[in-house]
Image (cartoon, grey):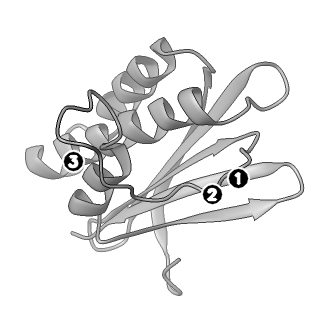
């Protein structure tokens, strides 16, 4: 993760470990950041949040209570840091090339294309996949 992350505002929501969790996260993030970042930056942040929550639902265990934690920070300078924390999975999240006819498998490639940087932090409780968008 970047070494000098300074937040001017921060939010955290808990969403269900279900496909609708991505919609809930996208809606909350959009409401919170509207007017604080450009439309393009907001669209990128919403896409990243949806992809990360979707991946957590498909590939990872939930946190206790059957939830996923989604947090984001408006960084000094206009960037956005998004963190999605789940109960972890057997395999570490990584970009994988999908087959030409695959209907899924592009989530982290999309995150990688939109974000300035992204990564995975693990602790004893699970994992956090984060992505940073520069201003």
Spot occupied by residue 11 in the image (x, y as percentages of width and height): 53, 43
Locate residue 11 relative to residue 39 in the image: left or right.
right
Q: What element carries label 3?
A: helix
Considering only order in the chain, which callout, 1 or 2, is on the residue closer to the N terminus?
A: 2
Q: Choose between 75 and 120: the one closer to the eye.
A: 120
Cβ–Cβ under 8 Å for marks 2 and 1: yes
- Alpha carbon separation for disc pair 2 and 1: 9 Å
Q: Which of marks 2 and 1 is in front?
A: 2
Mark 3 crowdedness (10 Å alpha carbons): few <14, some 14-19, many ≥20? some
Considering only order in the chain, which callout, 2 or 3, is on the residue closer to the N terminus?
A: 3
Identify the residue at horizontal 46%, vertical 12% (top origin). Answer: 20
State the residue position of label 2.
Answer: 92
The number of discs equals 3
**Which image quarter: residue 61?**
top right
State the residue position of label 3.
Answer: 44
Locate residue 93 relative to residue 101 in the image: left or right.
right
Identify the residue at horizontal 53%, vertical 77% (top origin). Answer: 1
Locate residue 108 relative to residue 12 in the image: left or right.
left
Identify the residue at horizontal 74%, vertical 48% (top origin). Answer: 90
């Amino acid at each position: 993760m970047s070494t000098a992350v300074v937040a001017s505002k921060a939010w955290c929501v808990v969403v269900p470990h279900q496909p609708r969790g991505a919609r809930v996260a996208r809606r909350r993030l959009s409401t919170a950041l509207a007017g604080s970042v450009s439309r393009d930056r907001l669209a990128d942040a919403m896409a990243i949040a949806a992809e990360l929550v979707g991946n957590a639902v498909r590939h990872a265990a939930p946190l206790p209570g059957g939830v996923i934690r989604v947090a984001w920070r408006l960084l000094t300078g206009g960037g956005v840091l998004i963190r999605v924390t789940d109960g972890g999975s057997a395999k570490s999240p990584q970009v994988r090339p999908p087959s030409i006819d695959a209907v899924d498998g592009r989530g982290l490639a999309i995150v990688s294309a939109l974000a300035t940087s992204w990564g995975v932090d693990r602790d004893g409780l699970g994992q956090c996949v984060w992505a940073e968008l520069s201003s």
